[in-house]
Image (cartoon, rainbow, N blue to C red):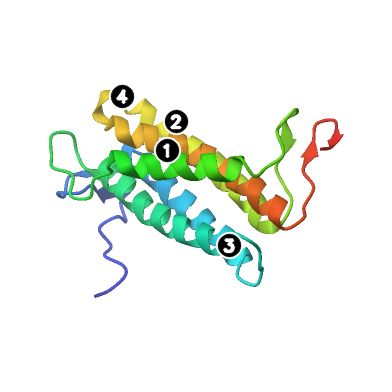
Amino acid sequence: MKIYTKTGDKGTTSLIYGQRVAKNDLRVEAYGTCDETNSMIGLALSYLKNENFQGKEIIENVYHKIQTNLFHVGAELATPTGKEVKWKLAPSDIELLEKQIDEWDTTLPGLTNFILPGGHPAGASLHVARTIVRRAERCAVSLGEEVNPLVLAYLNRLSDLLFVTARYVNYQLGQNEQTLHGNS
């Protein structure tokens, strides 16, 4: 099978079930931004490859599931209204995110100021992934009632988990968080 099809050469692409839309269609922007998030998560995880710290294996396992779920989110967003979604999110997917947020957040120093994104390259990349998933969420919200509410909840919770994971990674690797007013 060839990678290129030439069917998008005139600025259109196919949704699931074959409906053609412009490549700047809001649905395409939403699932494309999820794909961008997924790639940035992959970059963040690559920075952890040679690091050893408590919880690294859990991070890798959790984010493997998240990366898979981002394909499910993309499938939901790429499925036209009224058609059956083949890969669906479940409430348990959101519960997994909440469980990890709660678990890792309890190990971190409390926040008293806004923190500046940065730290270890993995932590900084997770902060970038957080901002990308927020953009995906804004795109999905713009689609209105056409979007499964679980998609919106998943993207919202994922941005929270990415924030906490960035802090957790930086903390585990001894990176001080920079605040608006200096070090915390």
Which residue position is annotated with label 4?
Answer: 144
Q: Amino acid at mark 2?
A: Arg
Which residue position is annotated with label 2?
Answer: 138
> In the rendered view, does 176 fall on the left or right side of 52?
right
Which residue position is annotated with label 3?
Answer: 56
Q: Earlier in the sequence, mark 3 or mark 4?
A: 3
Q: Residue furthest top?
A: 145
Q: CA distance from mark 4 to mark 2?
A: 10 Å
Residue 101 x/y as whole percent: 52, 41
Q: Residues within 10 Å of mark 2 (few under 14, many from 20)?
A: some
Q: Residues within 10 Å of mark 3 (few under 14, many from 20)?
A: some
Residue 5 x/y as whole percent: 26, 65
Q: Amino acid at mark 1?
A: Leu
Q: Residues within 10 Å of mark 4 (few under 14, many from 20)?
A: few
Q: CA distance from mark 3 to mark 4?
A: 37 Å
Q: CA distance from mark 2 to mark 1?
A: 9 Å
Give SS at disc 4. helix
Q: Earlier in the sequence, mark 3 or mark 2?
A: 3
Q: Amino acid at mark 3?
A: Lys
> In the rendered view, does 21 fall on the left or right side of 45?
left
Q: Is residue 136 visible?
A: no
Q: Earlier in the sequence, mark 2 or mark 1?
A: 2
Label total for image: 4
Which residue position is annotated with label 1?
Answer: 155
Marks 3, 1: nearer the viewer: 3
Residue 4 x/y as whole percent: 31, 67
Q: CA distance from mark 3 to mark 1?
A: 23 Å
Q: Is residue 39 above or below residue 29?
A: below
Depth order, front residue of 20/150: 150
Q: Amino acid at mark 4?
A: Gly
